[in-house]
Image (cartoon, helix red, strand yellow):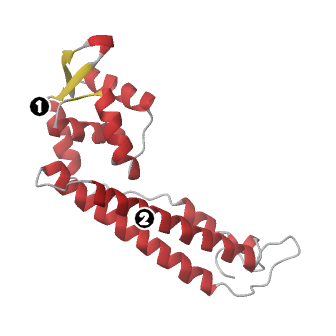
């Protein structure tokens, strides 16, 4: 996913200013695609230059309201319906886990226990978000609720997995430099 498509998607639902879009990012999209103010405003300028968004109103202090153009809507529809875009996923948690053999078993279990706690915290945060909103029949709310459900299930799964993984760590032998005597391939 790209910030470009996130912004096109938000503006497709409602014309908005950069300030409005930042508010939406902070309250909902930050859980799936965080963005800084400078990233949002920079991308809005690029989308306008590419004629995917248009400035339809200007207000005090340089406030601009953006709407999606037909070209922008076409690009958004192309991206939304492209199921083939599913490239490799980077997962820093799993990269850490892959190399836990370089620490002793106690440290590895402690790391995984902390990951379980973090997943529990994410789950609680998402549950608060779920209860704080009215998930009305408006498209953004309905589909936002589907995305939230994914987050709830993923956080619960990550918590359960981290607890399970911690229980799987025995007293694996380590080398004199602290690393496991078996490499990443298990040999």
Who is closer to the viewer here, 25 or 127?
127
Could you say which is closer to the camera, residue 75 or residue 48?
48
Mark-to-mark CA distance, 1 and 2: 40 Å
Mark number for residue 135?
Answer: none
* In this view, the mark in front (1 or 2): 2
Q: Residue 97 location, x and y as percent?
A: 61, 70
Point out residue 4 in the picture as x, y percentages from the top left corner. Answer: 32, 37
| Quarter residue 187 falls in | bottom right
- Horizontally, is 5 left or right of 182 in the view? left
Depicted 77 relative to depicted 160: above or below = above
Under tag 2, what secondary structure? helix
The residue under the point 19% across, 52% down is 141
Q: Name the residue under label 2.
A: 124
Q: What element carries label 1?
A: helix
At 43% from the left and 59% from the top, the residue drawn is: 88
Image check: 88 left or right of 11?
right
Quarter location, residue 45 = top left
Give above or below for 179 relative to 19.
below
Say above or below: 137 vs 36. below
**Residue placed under numbered mark 1 in the picture:** 70
Task: State the residue at coordinates (23%, 39%).
Answer: 10
Labels in figure, total: 2
Q: Can residue 119 be seen in this view?
A: yes
Tell me which residue sits at (39%, 57%) in the image.
87
Up the image or down, 47 lies above or below 166; here it is: above
Q: How crowded is mark 1: few (under 14 residues within 10 Å), some or many (20 or more)?
A: few
């Amino acid at each position: 996913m790209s910030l470009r498509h996130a912004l096109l998607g938000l503006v497709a639902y409602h014309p908005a200013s950069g300030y409005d879009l930042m508010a939406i990012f902070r309250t909902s999209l930050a859980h799936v695609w965080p963005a800084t103010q400078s990233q949002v405003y920079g991308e809005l300028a690029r989308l306008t230059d590419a004629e995917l968004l248009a400035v339809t109103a200007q207000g005090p202090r340089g406030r601009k309201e953006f709407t999606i153009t037909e070209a922008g809507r076409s690009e958004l529809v192309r991206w939304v319906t492209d199921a083939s875009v599913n490239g490799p996923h980077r997962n820093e948690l799993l990269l850490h886990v892959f190399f836990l053999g370089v620490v002793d078993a106690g440290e590895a279990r402690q790391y995984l226990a902390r990951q379980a706690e973090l997943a529990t915290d994410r789950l609680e945060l998402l549950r608060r978000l779920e209860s704080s909103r009215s998930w009305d029949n408006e498209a953004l709310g309905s589909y936002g609720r589907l995305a939230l459900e994914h987050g709830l299930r993923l956080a619960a799964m990550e918590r359960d997995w981290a607890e399970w993984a911690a229980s799987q760590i025995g007293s694996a032998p380590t080398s004199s430099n602290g690393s496991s005597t078996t490499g990443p391939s298990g040999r």
